[in-house]
Image (spheres, coloured by chain):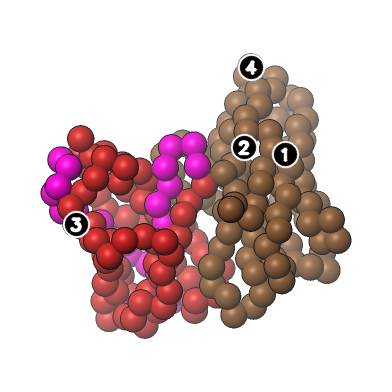
Amino acid sequence: ETGVTQSPTHLIKTRGQQVTLRCSSQSGHNTVSWYQQALGQGPQFIFQYYREEENGRGNFPPRFSGLQFPNYSSELNVNALELDDSALYLCASSFGPTGEQYFGPGTRLTVT
Amino acid sequence: KNQVEQSPQSLIILEGKNCTLQCNYTVSPFSNLRWYKQDTGRGPVSLTIMTFSENTKSNGRYTATLDADTKQSSLHITASQLSDSASYICVVSARCGDYKLSFGAGTTVTVRA
């Protein structure tokens, strides 16, 4: 176990709805990175939060947004859900933006 | 264009047998390469990490090799067990200071009794 937790484990949403996924980082870590992993694919970088600020973003539209809180936990918000948003969403925490990343178990999102 | 390519996409082996997974990358300048094991529906767990100067790293029955000149890495699993059934992902980091990781698509290994 890495000490990184995510909630919920699974959820099902309807196209057009909004969703919030949560991640608690490992103790001592101040950076959270979010990834989307489609079935049979490697994770794709969404964005990273460092000290409560967005520190970089992958090729994802603005309807993917995030937050990091003073305790370094983080949220991923996705608006106007599309069918292609169905995936495993992983968060990883690290000490600093380039530190070793430790992954959580993921949240499986299904959009119908 | 994916900068990390893995092969094979999937393989099936009998319990007790060995197998080797391949990873080719074009990420440059290179910082380090990691192999992760990902059980179905779970987050990836790090197996090995190698920097430019390292060409072999072992973790139990897992042995990773790195040839930084040809930009190739392999992961060898010895005496496979049923619990080795998982996806194995090769992840490459660019130079220090670049936080972005480049992930391969993974090789799915199925170990059968």
**Gap between marks 3 and 4 measured at Cα:** 45 Å
Q: Are the residues under marks 4 and 2 on the same chain? A: yes
Q: Which mark is residue B113?
A: 4
- Chain letter for the brown colouring in the rendering: B
Pointers 3 and 1 in contact (C-beta within 8 Å): no
Crowding at mark 4 (Cα within 10 Å: few <14, some 14-19, many 20+): few
**Gap between marks 3 and 2 measured at Cα:** 32 Å
**Closer mark to the observer between disc 3 and disc 2:** 3
Relative image position of residue A75 (x, y in whole percent): 26, 65
Sooner in the amino-acid sequence: mark 1 or mark 2: 1
The reply to whether residue A40 is visible in this rendering is: yes
Is residue A27 inside the magenta stretch? Answer: yes
> Which residue corresponds to mark 2?
B107
What is the chain letter for disc 1?
B
Q: On the rendered structure, is A31 left or right of A71?
A: right
Residue at (18, 52) in percent of width and height: A80
Q: Which mark is residue B21?
A: 1
Point out the stretch of residues depicted in magenta: A13-41
Callout 2: SS = strand
**Gap between marks 1 and 2 measured at Cα:** 7 Å
Q: Which mark is residue A79?
A: 3
Residue type of the residue flagged with mark 2: Thr
Residue type of the residue flagged with mark 4: Ala
What is the chain letter for disc 2?
B
Callout 3: SS = loop
Residue type of the residue flagged with mark 3: Asn
